[in-house]
Amino acid sequence: MRASRKAPLGRSPPSVSSSPPETETLLRLLKEKNVRASPQRSALIRALVGHKEEHPTAEDLFLDLRRRGEEVSLATVYNTLELLRQTGAVSELGFPSGPTRLDLNLTPHANLVCTACGRISDLPLDRLSEISQQIRGSSGFQVQRLRFDVYGLCSNCRAD
Amino acid sequence: MRASRKAPLGRSPPSVSSSPPETETLLRLLKEKNVRASPQRSALIRALVGHKEEHPTAEDLFLDLRRRGEEVSLATVYNTLELLRQTGAVSELGFPSGPTRLDLNLTPHANLVCTACGRISDLPLDRLSEISQQIRGSSGFQVQRLRFDVYGLCSNCRAD
DNA sequence: ATTTATAATTAGAATAATTCTAGATTAGCA
DNA sequence: TGCTAATCTAGAATTATTCTAATTATAAAT
């Protein structure tokens, strides 16, 4: 069993053939915390990295794993995501309605959240780090992490 | 009843003696939507405006109203907050854990969220609107609203 | 290899926050 | 005054997440 399908040259939208560097990074971060890279955790990390552009929910990942035969319990999905969050490699975006979605992009960026289709896309924004510096200086607030959401209509959903 | 304490020149932290302009604004916005300013809705709006600096939760407001004898059901609290959200006068901050908190500040600002004590304070940030302009221009994303959270340690909780 | 101790996984129960439902109340108006 | 629509409400239902306690897997030591 496992995911030892021979992968007949499969190269589709996300594409997780061998193992993107990000996967390795996350596994390494867990190792540094002295937690094992169990098959379930590895599978979850692969799913997460493979779908990071979609900012998946815990349930999305759970269902994705189940679909490809890598059965991981929902509890383990939540537990592992919490471990990853603690390493700082992953952050969670809570919204006033609907489930928490994952964000694997640690560089300063905006989350462009389309209020019509719900899609979230990342937009790199270097200026955020300047602002962060400025806040540290002026208000005596010791910055750890940023979240910048921009709500509006994406180019697809825009009417005009 | 009501908040008709004579307010002996009271000018304390929040200070809600007669009726701050914001209260009027919110009531007017509802009126424009052709919804009545019922006693329950007015009471809720007063509570919200009076506690906006604390970024209260729906339950905070519910309990606050109950404490001062203005009994409004929790369902009505949620319903009214949803009405206010629709007017755009109020926004809701969802977090990956814990309840949604309210934000009555519509000018561009950062939410300084202390990861130790949980307090949220607003910091005006004009540069956010520039950035918003820039996004509109470069990415074709039609911006409606911003949310900028800065997580870290507030000056009280900082160890150093 | 076997034992042992610890870590990890799991199903399902429990909780927390919010939304829904359907009946009672209230307000505006003919 | 009565009619209609809006509003309010308690409690049920739903959703997302966390907790619990029992099982299984792993690595280390023998």
Image: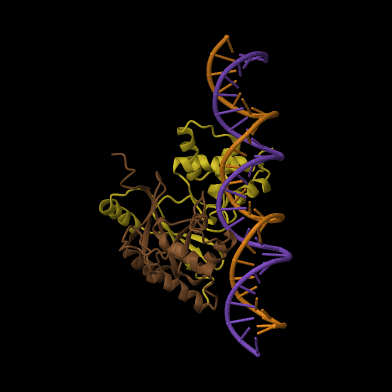
Chain colours: A yellow, B brown, C purple, D orange
Q: Residue at x 43, y 57 (%)?
A: B55
State which quadrant residue A37 falls in. top right
Q: Residue at x 63, y 49 (%)?
A: A64
Q: Residue at x 26, y 54 (%)?
A: A138
Please say whether residue A18 is visible from this viewpoint. no
Q: Is residue C18 left or right of residue B103?
A: right
Of residue D18 and residue A9, the one placed in the foreground of this image is: D18
Q: Position of residue B71 (x, y in %)?
A: 55, 60
Q: Is residue B58 left or right of residue A6?
A: left
Q: Residue at x 46, y 40 (%)?
A: A86
Q: Position of residue B153 (x, y in %)?
A: 35, 46
Q: Position of residue B22 (x, y in %)?
A: 40, 70
Please say whether residue B115 is visible from this viewpoint. yes
Of residue A71 and residue B3, the one placed in the foreground of this image is: B3
Q: Quadrant of the N terminus of chain A?
A: top right
Q: On screen, A4 above or below B36?
A: above
